[in-house]
Image (cartoon, rainbow, N blue to C red):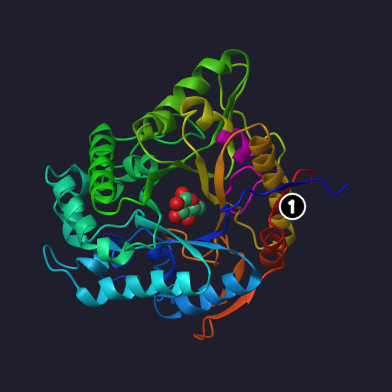
Amino acid sequence: MDQHLPLPAGFLMGAATAPHQVEGDNVHSDWWQWETAPDSEMPQPSGTACDSYHRWPEDMDLLARAGYNAYRFGIEWARIEPEEGRIDAAEVQHYRDMVEGAVQRGLTPVVTLHHFTNPAWFSSGGGWTRPDAVAHFSAYVRRVLPVLGDEVRTVVTINEPNMAAIFGRAHGGERPEPMGEGLLPAPDSTIAQRLIEAHRAASDILHGELPAVRVGWSVASQDVQGSGDGVGPALAYSQAVEDQFLFPAAEDDFIAVQSYTRTVFGPDGNVTPAPTGIVTDTNWEFWPSAVGEVIRHTHELLPHLPILVSENGIATRDDARRIDYLRGALPAVAQAMRDGIEVLGYLHWSLLDNYEWGSWDPHFGLIGVDRESGRFERTPKPSFDWLAGWARRGALPLGS
Ligand code: BGC
């Protein structure tokens, strides 16, 4: 009954966050401007978020005490460079303190350099469409090298470049059209190219200055399935929204995948509605095994690269559903590993009930946050302890 896969030494078991979603008061970022504009279409602003800018020691304490060994968090460019060319040394020190804080607690820091948000000045000048975008990003990367130091060995340069290329112009007033009902819009090719160049530039800087670091980026990866006449459209869709962002990772040290659900092209080539009929609070199909399929698909395209699961999770207020989801997802990861695929770690999305890009409604967290009282008290949910049990055991379940 108790079948499990012992984890290799160094396997990362933890959770992930992104600066804008948890820190609060990210006032120099483009997202802050969009959220607080008088005509903003976003239902809710991020505000003080989870106040993790001040409470990160508590967040890390919770992870470490529960038995996790890794924490993925990000550096916020808009704090480091609030105005073009002006570097805020206190913010550089802030993130350096976080890195040291993680290491002191026995948590391996996995650091993201860019997670959707840009400094407002960068976006108002055209964002990733501006010709000097790569030069600006490179300059920022150089300024955060002291944050990483010798301690940070795993860096995600850009989070979900495919989503950034899909929605990159959305807030400039351009509305990308979905490729079909239930599908994402196609990524913008100019932004996609810029992001690939920015990733390569960042990677060169990091490898040049910090020889021990391993560098990769994280692609939003859906389990895209097709049957009958749906096979062709499924392949084309996968190529457009994901694979074109996987190939540029071929020279990297790892590739990170972020998986939540699946997209199914039916026998008539149409996109089928969720066959199980169960959807999560983000209206995505409940499909925990997606992460395993995503690992296999990524491995097929990049067989020489180790894979990091840098996000995987479910939006639900029913924490028992989260545990159900984990009972499906973890064996899917373990089976892929047992089949010989090198997986570096599993980082759950998310550590906290955080700001979901315009809304506080979806609850992705292993830990609840009492925002209403203004005290931001953290309450670990049963799923937090359930997953920590596997971290402490140094194993993943092979069956649910
Ligand atoms: C992003 C996160 C987001 C999560 C759930 C990923 O696309 O990296 O920022 O909160 O999915 O939507």
The structure residue drawn at horizontal position 66% and vertical position 44%, both measured from the top left corner, is 286
- Cβ of mark 1 under 8 Å from ligand 1: the answer is no
Hey, what amino acid is under mark 1? Asp
Secondary structure state at the residue bearing disc 1: helix
In the shown orientation, is residue 3 left or right of residue 394?
A: right
Q: Nearer the viewer, residue 317 or 71?
A: 71
Counting from the top left corner in percent of width and height, residue 188 is at: 29, 35
The structure residue drawn at horizontal position 26% and vertical position 40%, both measured from the top left corner, is 200
Counting from the top left corner in percent of width and height, residue 49 is at: 43, 72
In the shown orientation, is residue 361 left or right of residue 160?
A: right
Q: How many marks?
A: 1
Classify 387 as above or below 271: below
Residue situated furthest top in the rendering: 229
Q: Nearer the viewer, residue 153 or 391?
A: 153
The structure residue drawn at horizontal position 65% and vertical position 71%, both measured from the top left corner, is 66
Is 304 magenta? The answer is no
Q: Nearer the viewer, residue 300 or 370?
A: 300
Where are the magenta residues, as a range? 278-295
Counting from the top left corner in percent of width and height, residue 215 is at: 37, 46
The structure residue drawn at horizontal position 44% and vertical position 69%, both measured from the top left corner, is 22
Classify 176 as above or below 81: above
Q: Work out whether residue 298 can be spotted.
A: yes
Counting from the top left corner in percent of width and height, residue 26 is at: 31, 70
The residue indicated by pointer 1 is 324
